[in-house]
Image (cartoon, grey):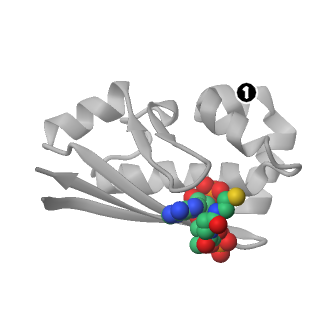
Amino acid sequence: MNIVGMGVDLAEIDRIRGLLQRYGQRFKTRCFTDHEWGYAHRYSDPSARLAARFAGKEAVMKSLGVGWRKVYWTDIEITGGGMPTVNLSGTALQRAESIGVDQVLVTITHTGDKALVFALSLAG
Ligand SMILES: CC(C)(COP(=O)(O)OP(=O)(O)OC[C@H]1O[C@@H](n2cnc3c(N)ncnc32)[C@H](O)[C@@H]1OP(=O)(O)O)[C@@H](O)C(=O)NCCC(=O)NCCS
Protein backbone atom coordinates (compact mmCIF):
# COMPACT_ATOMS: atom_id res chain seq x y z
CA MET A 1 0.00 0.00 0.00
CA ASN A 2 1.56 3.29 -1.11
CA ILE A 3 0.55 6.82 -0.16
CA VAL A 4 0.07 8.69 -3.44
CA GLY A 5 -1.13 11.96 -1.93
CA MET A 6 -2.55 13.65 1.11
CA GLY A 7 -4.74 16.69 1.65
CA VAL A 8 -6.29 18.73 4.40
CA ASP A 9 -8.95 21.44 4.51
CA LEU A 10 -10.66 23.55 7.12
CA ALA A 11 -14.17 25.01 6.61
CA GLU A 12 -15.83 27.81 8.55
CA ILE A 13 -19.25 26.47 9.53
CA ASP A 14 -20.81 29.97 9.50
CA ARG A 15 -19.77 30.45 5.89
CA ILE A 16 -21.43 27.20 4.89
CA ARG A 17 -24.54 28.16 6.89
CA GLY A 18 -24.66 31.42 4.93
CA LEU A 19 -24.36 29.62 1.57
CA LEU A 20 -27.09 27.22 2.66
CA GLN A 21 -29.43 30.08 3.60
CA ARG A 22 -28.64 32.04 0.45
CA TYR A 23 -28.57 29.31 -2.18
CA GLY A 24 -30.39 26.33 -0.59
CA GLN A 25 -31.21 23.78 -3.27
CA ARG A 26 -28.71 25.29 -5.75
CA PHE A 27 -25.92 24.74 -3.22
CA LYS A 28 -27.09 21.15 -2.82
CA THR A 29 -27.26 20.43 -6.54
CA ARG A 30 -23.80 21.86 -7.20
CA CYS A 31 -21.94 20.41 -4.22
CA PHE A 32 -23.60 17.51 -2.41
CA THR A 33 -24.95 14.04 -3.10
CA ASP A 34 -28.39 12.94 -1.89
CA HIS A 35 -26.72 10.82 0.78
CA GLU A 36 -24.61 13.73 2.09
CA TRP A 37 -27.59 16.09 2.10
CA GLY A 38 -29.82 13.54 3.82
CA TYR A 39 -27.21 12.71 6.46
CA ALA A 40 -26.59 16.39 7.29
CA HIS A 41 -30.33 17.03 7.57
CA ARG A 42 -30.70 14.38 10.26
CA TYR A 43 -29.43 17.23 12.47
CA SER A 44 -31.49 20.32 13.31
CA ASP A 45 -28.60 22.44 12.02
CA PRO A 46 -27.05 20.62 9.04
CA SER A 47 -24.26 23.21 8.64
CA ALA A 48 -21.49 21.38 10.55
CA ARG A 49 -21.95 18.14 8.58
CA LEU A 50 -22.16 19.99 5.27
CA ALA A 51 -19.08 22.05 6.17
CA ALA A 52 -17.21 18.82 6.96
CA ARG A 53 -18.21 17.35 3.61
CA PHE A 54 -17.30 20.54 1.76
CA ALA A 55 -13.87 20.59 3.43
CA GLY A 56 -13.59 16.85 2.86
CA LYS A 57 -14.10 17.21 -0.88
CA GLU A 58 -11.35 19.84 -1.01
CA ALA A 59 -9.05 17.64 1.08
CA VAL A 60 -9.73 14.70 -1.27
CA MET A 61 -9.03 16.90 -4.33
CA LYS A 62 -5.69 17.89 -2.79
CA SER A 63 -4.86 14.25 -2.11
CA LEU A 64 -5.58 13.53 -5.79
CA GLY A 65 -3.48 16.51 -6.89
CA VAL A 66 -6.37 18.37 -8.59
CA GLY A 67 -8.60 21.35 -7.88
CA TRP A 68 -12.33 22.01 -8.22
CA ARG A 69 -11.92 23.18 -11.79
CA LYS A 70 -11.03 19.61 -12.82
CA VAL A 71 -13.36 17.58 -10.61
CA TYR A 72 -17.10 17.99 -9.92
CA TRP A 73 -17.97 18.42 -6.24
CA THR A 74 -20.68 15.79 -6.50
CA ASP A 75 -18.22 13.22 -7.89
CA ILE A 76 -16.69 12.97 -4.39
CA GLU A 77 -19.10 11.63 -1.76
CA ILE A 78 -18.21 11.45 1.92
CA THR A 79 -20.58 9.21 3.80
CA GLY A 80 -22.08 9.97 7.18
CA GLY A 81 -23.08 7.86 10.16
CA GLY A 82 -20.04 6.35 11.85
CA MET A 83 -16.61 6.09 10.24
CA PRO A 84 -16.73 8.18 7.05
CA THR A 85 -15.92 6.55 3.71
CA VAL A 86 -15.20 8.15 0.33
CA ASN A 87 -17.05 7.18 -2.84
CA LEU A 88 -15.57 8.51 -6.07
CA SER A 89 -17.42 8.67 -9.38
CA GLY A 90 -17.14 10.40 -12.76
CA THR A 91 -14.38 13.00 -12.96
CA ALA A 92 -12.94 12.13 -9.53
CA LEU A 93 -12.82 8.40 -10.28
CA GLN A 94 -11.12 9.08 -13.62
CA ARG A 95 -8.49 11.22 -11.91
CA ALA A 96 -7.91 8.58 -9.21
CA GLU A 97 -7.54 5.82 -11.81
CA SER A 98 -5.15 7.91 -13.90
CA ILE A 99 -2.70 8.16 -10.97
CA GLY A 100 -3.24 4.61 -9.70
CA VAL A 101 -5.28 5.51 -6.60
CA ASP A 102 -7.69 2.76 -5.58
CA GLN A 103 -8.68 3.93 -2.10
CA VAL A 104 -9.19 7.30 -0.42
CA LEU A 105 -9.46 7.63 3.36
CA VAL A 106 -10.73 10.65 5.29
CA THR A 107 -11.01 11.58 8.92
CA ILE A 108 -13.29 14.38 10.13
CA THR A 109 -13.61 16.57 13.20
CA HIS A 110 -15.85 19.58 13.88
CA THR A 111 -16.12 22.11 16.66
CA GLY A 112 -18.80 24.78 17.02
CA ASP A 113 -17.32 26.95 14.30
CA LYS A 114 -14.96 24.90 12.12
CA ALA A 115 -14.76 21.52 10.40
CA LEU A 116 -11.39 19.93 9.63
CA VAL A 117 -10.81 16.99 7.30
CA PHE A 118 -7.65 15.09 6.44
CA ALA A 119 -7.52 12.82 3.38
CA LEU A 120 -5.11 10.13 2.15
CA SER A 121 -5.06 8.68 -1.36
CA LEU A 122 -3.65 5.16 -1.52
CA ALA A 123 -2.51 2.74 -4.21
CA GLY A 124 -1.97 -1.01 -4.21
C1 LIG B 1 -16.20 8.85 16.84
C2 LIG B 1 -15.95 9.83 18.00
C3 LIG B 1 -14.54 9.60 18.56
C4 LIG B 1 -16.12 11.27 17.48
O1 LIG B 1 -15.54 12.20 18.36
P1 LIG B 1 -16.22 13.58 18.76
O2 LIG B 1 -15.22 14.36 19.49
O3 LIG B 1 -17.54 13.29 19.37
O4 LIG B 1 -16.59 14.32 17.39
P2 LIG B 1 -15.64 14.91 16.23
O5 LIG B 1 -16.22 16.20 15.80
O6 LIG B 1 -14.19 14.91 16.60
O7 LIG B 1 -15.81 13.83 15.07
C5 LIG B 1 -17.02 13.70 14.39
C6 LIG B 1 -16.74 12.84 13.20
O8 LIG B 1 -16.18 11.59 13.60
C7 LIG B 1 -16.38 10.67 12.55
N1 LIG B 1 -16.69 9.36 13.11
C8 LIG B 1 -17.83 8.95 13.68
N2 LIG B 1 -17.70 7.67 14.07
C9 LIG B 1 -16.47 7.28 13.71
C10 LIG B 1 -15.75 6.06 13.84
N3 LIG B 1 -16.29 4.99 14.41
N4 LIG B 1 -14.50 5.99 13.34
C11 LIG B 1 -13.94 7.06 12.74
N5 LIG B 1 -14.57 8.25 12.61
C12 LIG B 1 -15.82 8.35 13.10
C13 LIG B 1 -17.52 11.19 11.70
O9 LIG B 1 -17.00 11.49 10.44
C14 LIG B 1 -17.97 12.46 12.43
O10 LIG B 1 -18.30 13.52 11.57
P3 LIG B 1 -19.65 13.50 10.69
O11 LIG B 1 -20.81 13.30 11.61
O12 LIG B 1 -19.65 14.83 10.01
O13 LIG B 1 -19.48 12.34 9.73
C15 LIG B 1 -16.96 9.62 19.14
O14 LIG B 1 -18.24 10.01 18.69
C16 LIG B 1 -16.98 8.18 19.61
O15 LIG B 1 -16.15 7.74 20.37
N6 LIG B 1 -17.91 7.42 19.16
C17 LIG B 1 -17.88 6.02 19.51
C18 LIG B 1 -18.81 5.34 18.65
C19 LIG B 1 -20.12 5.51 19.28
O16 LIG B 1 -20.28 5.42 20.45
N7 LIG B 1 -21.07 5.78 18.46
C20 LIG B 1 -22.35 5.99 18.94
C21 LIG B 1 -23.28 5.97 17.80
S1 LIG B 1 -24.89 6.08 18.39
Figure check: 117 above or below 58: below
Q: Nearer the viewer, residue 113 or 1?
A: 1
> In which quadrant of the rendered image does the N terminus lie?
bottom left
Secondary structure category for the residue under label 1: helix
Q: Can residue 71 be seen at all in this image of the molecule? A: yes
Let me know if residue 10 appears in the view.
no
The residue drawn where x is 73% and y is 27% is 26
Q: Under 8 Å from ligand 1: the CB of mark 1? A: no
Image quadrant, ligand 1: bottom right
Q: Residue at x 72, y 44 (%)?
A: 40
Residue at 27% in and 47% down:
103
| Location of residue 68 by image quarter | top left
Residue position marked by numbered label 1 in the rendering: 26
Residue 99, horizontal then vertical, whole percent: 14, 43
- The answer to whether 114 is drawn above or below residue 75 in the figure is below
Quadrant of the rendered image containing residue 86: top left
- Nearer-the-camera pick, 27 or 79: 79
Q: In the image as oriented, which residue stretches furthest toward the front?
A: 82
Residue 23 picture location, percent across and down = 80, 34
Q: Residue at x 32, y 50 (%)?
A: 104
Amino acid type, mark 1: Arg
Q: Nearer the viewer, residue 10 or 77?
A: 77
Q: Nearer the viewer, residue 117 or 124?
A: 124
Q: Is residue 107 left or right of residue 115?
A: left
The answer to whether 119 appears left or right of 26 in the picture is left
Q: Position of residue 19 (x, y in %)?
A: 77, 45
